[in-house]
Amino acid sequence: MVMQEDFEQYAEKAKTLPPTQSNEDLLILYGLYKQATVGPVNTSRPGMFNMRDRAKWDAWKAVEGKSKDEAMSDYITKVKQLLEAAGMPA
């Protein structure tokens, strides 16, 4: 249960990240968050004209093999890295 609480805490902290984060980092966070909260991809891949949703779907699909706990742990680690890089307390 501690992992779930830490995950929720870092999900809130992720919202405070400066808007200068790279799309790549944001997509990594998105994919890990979806894997941790929803599980494996459960929708079809968006069409090629919907680039934003397609990139998000691809990021989620890239971490599909991770367990819920692995995804949570990786998400927390990534948020900590981004906060530290931004000079914010992790």
Image (tube, rainbow, N blue to C red):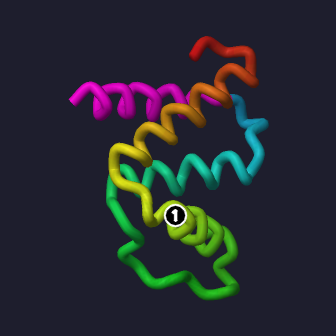
Q: Point out residue 38 in the picture as x, y percentages from the top left corner.
A: 33, 59
Report the residue at 59% width, 63% height from top: 59
Depicted 4 relative to depicted 57: above or below: above
Asked where in the image residue 50 lies, by quadrant, the reply is: bottom right
Report the residue at 61% width, 74% height from top: 54
Depicted 85 relative to depicted 71: above or below: above
Q: Does residue 25 appear left or right of residue 39 in this picture?
A: right
* Disc 1: CA contacts within 10 A as few (<14), some (14-19) or many (>=20): many
| Closer-to-camera residue (44/40) | 40
Q: Does residue 75 appear left or right of residue 43 in this picture?
A: right
Pointer 1: what residue? Answer: 60
Q: Point out residue 61 in the picture as x, y percentages from the top left corner.
A: 52, 69
The N terminus - image quarter:
top left
Report the residue at 37% width, 67% height from top: 40
Q: Is residue 16 magenta?
A: yes
Depicted 84 relative to depicted 47: above or below: above
Tag 1 secondary structure:
helix
Q: Does residue 19 appear left or right of residue 30 in this picture?
A: right
Residue span colored magenta:
1-17
Query: Furthest residue to the top?
Result: 89
Asked where in the image residue 21 lies, by quadrant, the reply is: top right
Depicted 1 relative to depicted 35: above or below: above
Q: Point out residue 86 in the picture as x, y percentages from the top left corner.
A: 74, 22
The C terminus - image quarter:
top right
Q: Amino acid at mark 1?
A: Trp
Report the residue at 75% width, 24% height from top: 85
Q: Is residue 12 magenta?
A: yes
Magenta-colored segment: predominant secondary structure: helix
